[in-house]
Image: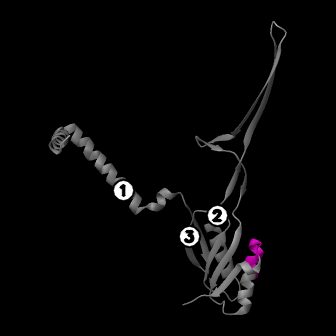
Amino acid sequence: MDFKKIKNEVNKLFKNKYMGNILAVLLVIGFILIAITILAPGLLSGKDEVLTEENNTKVNTTVSTYEDKQKVELTNILRKIDGVGEVDVMINFESGEEKVAAYDSTNQTTKTEETDTNGGKRVSNQQNDTTKVVMSSESGGNSPVILKTYKPKVIGVVITAEGAESSKVRYDIEKAVSSLYGISVEKVNVYPMGI
């Protein structure tokens, strides 16, 4: 198909009033969807908002994962240690969250013995094993039944804090983080916050 034929077909579509209206509506809907995704990305992400209050100042923090939640909670608790001011935290995890689903297992064994007219005997065994994930119907949708959820293991933490120039404050932070996550003090690095 050459360019002139394509141009003629497009012109025919726009000359038809009904098709022109449909195309105009589709274009408007497309622009609205693009505007929503650009102007309000948080609406489509499904993230929870947590509002914390520290020293009479409200901090609005978006928490999307377990890792982010741990970072926010650790930051808030470290700020409450005597001698610690502003804190930035970076937590290194071994892996992501792991969920263990429930399975329904069925084992079926069939044994068949056949004897033919010549006196021959044949035995056949058949075993069927089926395993499927147990599903539950909630809120109009199906989702797997989760037996256990393993949270990610913390393997290291880096902290910058106001007041960490003091060895006592640095030790208090290291000890708190070490106790909280069950990791050795060597895996907790605390540095004074630069200006």
The amino acid marked with disc number 3 is: Thr
The segment highlighted magenta reads 175-183
Residue 135 showing in the rendered view: yes
- Asked which quadrant contains residue 150, the reply is bottom right
Circle 2 Cα neighbour tier, 10 Å, few/some/many (<14 / 14–19 / ≥20): few
Which corner quadrant of the image does residue 124 belong to?
Answer: top right
Residue 32, image x and y in percent? Answer: 34, 54
Numbered circle sitting on residue 61: 3
Q: Which class describes the residues within 10 Å of circle 1: few (<14), some (14-19), or many (20+)? A: few
Coloring applied to the structure: one colour
Gap in angstroms between the C-alphas marked 1 and 2: 30 Å
**Residue under label 2:** 66
Q: Which amino acid lies under the numbered mark 1 shown in the image of this protein?
A: Ile
Report the magenta stretch's main SS: helix
Left or right of 54 in this view: 39: left
Residue shown at 19% from the left, 42% from the top: 6
